[in-house]
């Protein structure tokens, strides 16, 4: 294959790259209420775009899916929380959560996140494991609806869990690692009560998470399937910086050839003479 002169090759590459549609990561910040990156080694976990900083109850840190993650120990009763706030309360609206988790144990009913206490009159929403299986529940004040994932989690592996309420369709749904969503009916919206938001625990029932939690996000809208795919990012996660800048990880040029997997899987020789 004949190589193009260096500058001509670069010009052709740039022209073709600009013509290829790029992932719309910037849209992921639309109606993003809170995003906890979990970068802190200890202490308060900052809500990067919002004001819902989480109070620390002895949660430490380890390497996460993106940067650091919170390290929760069930035996030490560690968790993070925030008092009731309109930003964390729902009602009959669209909303979506995402969370990355890496369980250290998968027994019992460990709570990943929740708001409101157990019981039909006080349950707002909760994500937990039923043994090793993720389960998402929402309550409307008189009853609860639940969606259970179709597979079990394995200790020591990272999982991306996305779960939502669709007000117009009167349904809730859950997906793990960008799999086919499991959805079902739910009417009456979601109870808007005074319960605290808790990450890594259901303190009222003494149900504590054992493992890592990272990149927790809350949108007050229903994410699209393509947005969930972008957030999963082939199992690598997506940082808040990438979401807010609209930029994916840049393509790497090595040996004069554009890295496979760049937009359009473009292969173009742009090496020097």
Image: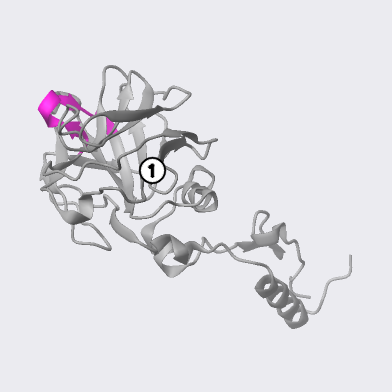
255 or 243: nearer the eye? 243
Q: Is 210 one of the magenta-colored residues?
A: yes
172 or 258: nearer the eye? 172
Q: Which segment is the magenta one? A: 199-211
For image coordinates 37% across by 35% down, the residue present is 186
For image coordinates 33% across by 30% down, the residue present is 145
Q: Is residue 36 above or below residue 5?
A: above
Picture quarter containing residue 80?
top left
Q: Horizontal and vertical percent for residue 24?
A: 53, 64
Query: How many callouts does the rendering have?
Result: 1
Q: Which quadrant would the N terminus be assigned to in this image?
A: bottom right
Q: Using residue 227 as the reference point, say whether residue 188 is left or right of it.
A: left
89 or 100: nearer the eye? 89
Q: Is 105 one of the magenta-colored residues?
A: no
Q: Using residue 227 as the reference point, say whether residue 37 is left or right of it.
A: left
For image coordinates 21% across by 49% down, the residue present is 89
Q: Horizontal and vertical percent for residue 146?
A: 35, 28
Q: Residue under circle 1?
A: 164
Is residue 94 something one can see in this rendering?
Answer: yes
117 or 140: nearer the eye? 140
Q: Is residue 110 above or below residue 46?
A: above
Q: Is residue 116 above or below residue 12?
A: above
Q: Using residue 65 as the reference point, say whether residue 213 is left or right of it.
A: left
Is residue 255 something one can see in this rendering?
Answer: no
């Amino acid at each position: 294959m004949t190589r193009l002169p260096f500058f001509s090759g670069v010009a052709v590459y740039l022209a073709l790259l600009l013509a290829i549609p790029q992932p719309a990561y910037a849209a992921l910040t639309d109606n993003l209420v809170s995003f906890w990156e979990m970068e802190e080694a200890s202490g308060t976990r900052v809500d990067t775009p919002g004001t819902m900083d989480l109070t620390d109850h002895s949660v430490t840190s380890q390497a996460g899916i993106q940067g650091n993650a919170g390290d929760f120990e069930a035996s030490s009763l560690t968790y993070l929380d925030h008092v009731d706030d309109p930003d964390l309360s729902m009602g009959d609206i669209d909303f979506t959560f995402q969370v990355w988790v890496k369980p250290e144990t998968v027994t019992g009913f460990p709570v990943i996140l929740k708001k409101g206490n157990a019981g039909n009159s006080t349950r707002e929403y909760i994500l937990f494991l039923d043994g090793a299986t993720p389960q998402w529940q929402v309550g409307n004040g008189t009853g609860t609806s639940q969606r259970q994932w179709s597979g079990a989690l394995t200790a020591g592996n990272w999982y991306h869990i996305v779960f939502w309420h669709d007000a117009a369709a009167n349904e809730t749904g859950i997906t793990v690692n960008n799999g086919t969503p499991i959805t079902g009916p739910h009417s009456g919206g979601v109870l808007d009560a005074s319960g605290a938001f808790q990450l890594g625990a259901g303190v009222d029932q003494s149900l504590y998470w054992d493992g890592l939690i990272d990149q927790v996000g809350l949108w007050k809208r229903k994410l699209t399937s393509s947005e969930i795919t972008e957030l999963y990012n082939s199992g690598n996660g997506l940082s808040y910086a990438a979401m807010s800048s609209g930029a994916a990880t840049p393509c790497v040029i090595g040996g004069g050839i554009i890295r496979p997997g760049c937009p359009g899987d473009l292969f173009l020789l742009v090496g020097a003479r």
